[in-house]
Amino acid sequence: MKINKNLLFIPIFLICVLTISYFAHSYYSKKEFKQKINFLIAKVEVSPALRCRFYDKKGNQLNMNSYTFYEFQKIISNDSIAKNENSSELKIYRRNKNGEFYVYLELEPD
């Protein structure tokens, strides 16, 4: 029985892709875990998939791989996103009528 060499290549290729994906995800998750975040939202964009992208007043986008923000969470401009170093808990703060921040939403990584 002859084994086609191309058929042998496919599982090896898939294993390599999965291994690389796993280590890349692990690297970025650890990097985000160690990162401290203090981000004041100036602009919110909602994608067709109802996911939100946030920008500060300088136009810098908040890029986070471990958290997904959805339109139904009602995160608006002037909300603040904060995360302590070596913590996975992300908090979204909103101002009350007195101008003081309160915790509006708490998120854990996806």
Image: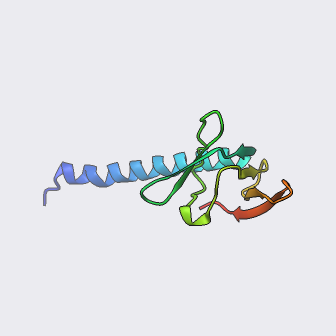
Of 49 and 32, nearer the camera is 49
Number of numbered discs: 0
Screen quadrant of the C terminus:
bottom right
User: Quarter-wise, where is residue 43 in the image?
Assistant: top right
Residue found 64% across the figure and 60% down from its top: 109
Q: Is residue 35 visible?
A: no
Residue found 60% across the figure and 54% down from its top: 66
Farthest-out residue, front: 97
In the rendered view, does 48 fall on the left or right side of 87? left
Residue found 77% across the figure and 50% down from its top: 86
User: Quarter-wise, where is residue 100 in the image?
Assistant: bottom right
x and y percentages locating residue 103 in the rendered image: 79, 62
In the rendered view, does 108 fall on the left or right side of 85? left
Screen quadrant of the N terminus:
bottom left
In the rendered view, does 90 fall on the left or right side of 24? right
Judge whether 50 appears above or below 83 on screen: below
> Which colour assignment does the render follow?
rainbow
Farthest-out residue, bottom: 72
Judge whether 27 appears above or below 93 on screen: above
In the rendered view, does 47 fall on the left or right side of 75? left
Q: Is residue 69 visible?
A: yes
x and y percentages locating residue 41 in the rendered image: 67, 46
Residue found 58% across the figure and 58% down from its top: 69
Farthest-out residue, left: 1
Of 47 and 7, nearer the camera is 47
User: Quarter-wise, where is residue 59 in the image?
Assistant: top right
x and y percentages locating residue 3 in the rendered image: 17, 56
